[in-house]
Amino acid sequence: MGSGLETADEETQTGPSWQNGCYPTSPTFGIVCSEHVGVVGKGLEGGQLVSRKWLKAFCVPATWMSKSWSCFGYPLSIFFIVVNEFCERFSYYGMRALLVLYFRNFIGWDDNLSTAIYHTFVALCYLTPILGALIADSWLGKFKTIVSLSIVYTIGQVVTAISSINDLTDHNHDGTPDNLPTHVALSMIGLALIALGTGGIKPCVSAFGGDQFEEGQEKQRNRFFSIFYLSINAGSFLSTIITPILRVQQCGIHSKQACYPLAFGVPAALMAVSLIVFVIGSSMYKKFKPQGNIMGKVAKCIGFALTNRFRHRSSKFPKREHWLDWAREKYDERLISQIKMVTRVMFLYIPLPMFWALFDQQGAFEIQPDQMQTANAILIIVMVPVVDAVVYPLIAKCGFNFTSLKKMTVGMFLASMAFVAAAIVQVEIDKTLPVFPKGNEVQIKVLNIGNSNMTIYFPEKTETIGQMSQTDGFLTFQANKLGSISISSTGSSNATVVHDFEQGQRHTLLVWAPNQYRVVNDGLNQKPEKGENGIRFVNAFNDVISLTSSGKVYENVTRNNASEYQFFSSGKKNFTFSAADISQHCKLSFETTKLEYGSAYTYVIQRTNDCPEFKEFEDISPNTVNMALQIPQYFLLTCGEVVFSITGLEFSYSQAPSNMKSVLQAGWLLTVAFGNIIVLIVAGAARFNEQWAEYVLFAALLLVVCIIFAIMAQFYTYVNPAEIEAQFDEEERKKYLENRNPYSMEPDSQTKM
């Protein structure tokens, strides 16, 4: 025995079986197995050889121990995982940014159906993580689960891209698909595969990344989760900028239209790149094999504990420290301890769906032009390294024990304060908002497009309006007191306006002669959303006209009539004019003034020397509150998200037993799913008349959730699952040595000396 490596019989010799390469590390950590070591190492104590049965019972294969590549103290393998996540998130968010437009413009669904299908898809993406976690922890392992479901994911992206090819069914080459059900079926199949793929890999990738770190690398592992979250936001930020640009390109074989195949195809290609990058790093990964149907064991253990506790509910039976301890009669301490770890964390998650439900209301922030829509993603990219490399180290130097749960509590508080800041900004915005009619009111504006002055007689008010001009804003009347309105001009008798004005609406009274008028329902009873600007046209050209700009068409605007509003982003806009009877020398395009944010304009087109002339009238003033006032709320919201979300990922990983890492990550993601479900349920609930009051309510509710979570966190005891499992390994090793002679290979074989 003392001469180095010994020859072993069938039970101990090397070979292709899974235990090949098991060797002892230390009495504390027991035996480590690696198929790359090549021989069975020397014994537990004093150079003893061990049997295959012992190895099967107590060794966990760790095929990753062949080489450990590192860079700056981090496993090189995480580079592939981070790049994989960046590409996958680019793929997902790029595709998702187009869905509603695709449903509405290509398939032809209305807004309600398009939005409903979109939200159903998003909900599925957050409900499928539990399925992926079960597959990873109980069957395939994280690596194989990620690869398998990434293939499904890629196929789904490709199918979705194919569904958007117009020429697939455009047999008559008229630019529209002839068989919409085919496109609908393909798109639904593609989205179902995407939901399964993205949801299934979501809990596995973060947990798999955490697996790459050794004991003692907690700092590096925590920083990995920050980098991981940064890659998520970088991918989503770039994709939401790039894919809309791809969509507006014109493509097609027989006809040209918005290029959805390209816009969906690029995310599909990025998903393929994501899969390839992940597989390339295969040889560097630590890969832990799953330990059977762990969730089945967990469910049975919990069920037995509850049943056994109910059977022994009488006071004559002594109480046990924890309700799961009632499973001791049937299940081992290791499994019970692991379930305790998971249930303690899941209990902490109970208030989190409400946090996510309220957090998602950030979309209600008013006045969000394109620049502010991207502010959150940009701030996250900036703040993640700042918080991780500057803020946390400074807090640590101050001697404050800033634990994970304290970080999450602070994140909730910051999000609450973001809504307070939003309420303050909203109060300032409300001071500048135009007054819109209430339910029992009618608002009227008069626009004189004639060639003479007009006098309008309202109840208790008279307005004289010059040619090609309008009243100074909208006049407000009680609907039941409006009475009659009459029009007159010099040398003409009065004409009475006959119209049933709709309550709660704004109207424009177009006048070009005392007895010639038209009442137009504006259909715009609020500021344009997302900082856009409304533009409509009034035709005083005496011919049917059409106008186009940025792909939007005002078609066949009839004489002395107004078009509906269409909405544009800020900046100057160019319009092209067309009419049947127009001189060749006329300028057929015009440029608007520079549009700001949240405004609305009416452009009157009149005939001057047989050519169109455009005159601008302001219907709603642009926003006057400085956009910079919104920065504090976005900053607070971003800081809250960074502190809360990243910490939640690392906390879920660090407190989970080794065989349930993905399951607990899925539990974390489910809190987001349930939060979205809460939003859908209460979406139809009554809202406040004042937006600032709604923000104050959100802030108060978030603060209540924050306080509840902080109280729950006070009673939580942090654990080190690896140490606890190592203690169980040591105890089981000692029991084995006490109950069995380690030199004995019975009953199957004996060691050859």
Image (cartoon, rainbow, N blue to C red):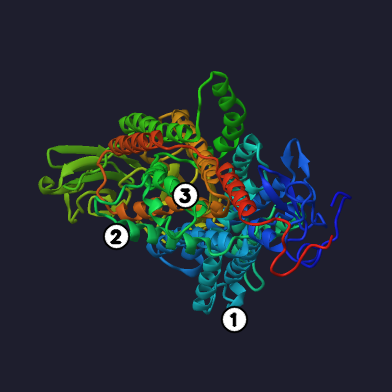
**Residue 299 seen in the figure:** yes
When asked about the image quadrant of residue 225, the answer is top right
- The furthest residue to the right: 3
Cα separation, mark 1 vs mark 2, equals 71 Å
- Name the residue that disc number 2 marks: 311
Name the residue type under label 2.
Answer: Arg
Q: Within 10 angstroms of label 3, few (less than 14), some, or many (20 or more) residues? A: some
Name the residue type under label 3.
Answer: Val
Residue 645 % position (x, y): 50, 41
Cα separation, mark 3 vs mark 2, equals 25 Å
Q: Residue at the spot x=40%, y=40% of the render?
A: 365
Do labels 3 and 1 touch, CB within 8 Å?
Answer: no
- 455 or 695, which is in the foreground? 695
Residue 144 % position (x, y): 65, 62
Secondary element under disc 1, as helix, strand or loop, is loop
Which disc number belongs to residue 342?
3
- 587 or 141, which is in the foreground? 141
- 18 or 42, which is in the foreground? 42
Mark nearer the N terminus (3 vs 1): 1
**Residue 83 seen in the figure:** no
Label total for image: 3
- 23 or 622, which is in the foreground? 23
Residue 256 % position (x, y): 62, 67
Secondary element under disc 2, as helix, strand or loop, is helix
- Name the residue that disc number 1 marks: 171
Mark nearer the N terminus (3 vs 2): 2
